[in-house]
Image (cartoon, grey):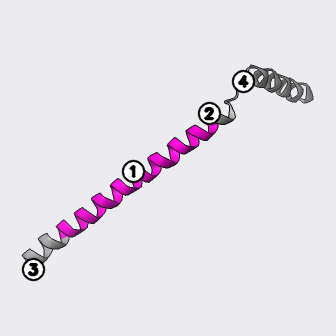
Amino acid sequence: MFRRIKRFFADVAIELKKTTWPSKTDVIWTTVVTCVMVAVVTAFLAVVDIALSKALTFIFSAIA
């Protein structure tokens, strides 16, 4: 059993050597793009939510 565990960690070390890590600049730009997209989608959903809320309020107040 310990051989299997040792082999597993040896395989992990081999795979980590094959990994290419992004540069600091890539990480920063990816983070910025992600934050901007989250803000844009949040703003869009807020506008849609407010518009639908007002539309439904208008419809239900006209019915009642």
Cα separation, mark 3 vs mark 2, equals: 56 Å
Up-down: is 35 above or below 23? below
Q: Earlier in the sequence, mark 3 or mark 2?
A: 2
Residue at image mark 1? 41
Up-down: is 9 above or below 30? above
Magenta span: predominant SS is helix
- Packing grade of label 1 (10 A; few <14, some 14-19, many >=20) is few
- x and y percentages locating residue 7 in the rendered image: 86, 23
Q: Nearer the viewer, mark 2 or mark 4?
A: 2
Residue located at (85% from left, 23% from top):
10
Q: Amino acid at mark 1?
A: Val
Discs 2, 4 touching: Cβ within 8 Å: no
Residue located at (40% from left, 50% from top):
40
Q: Earlier in the sequence, mark 1 or mark 4?
A: 4
- Packing grade of label 2 (10 A; few <14, some 14-19, many >=20) is few
Residue at image mark 4? 19
Residue at image mark 3? 64
- Under circle 1, the secondary element is helix
- Direction from residue 23 to residue 50 in the image, left or right: left
- Direction from residue 24 to residue 5 in the image, left or right: right
Discs 1, 3 touching: Cβ within 8 Å: no
Cα separation, mark 2 vs mark 4, equals: 15 Å
Q: Amino acid at mark 3?
A: Ala
Is residue 23 highlighted in magenta?
A: no
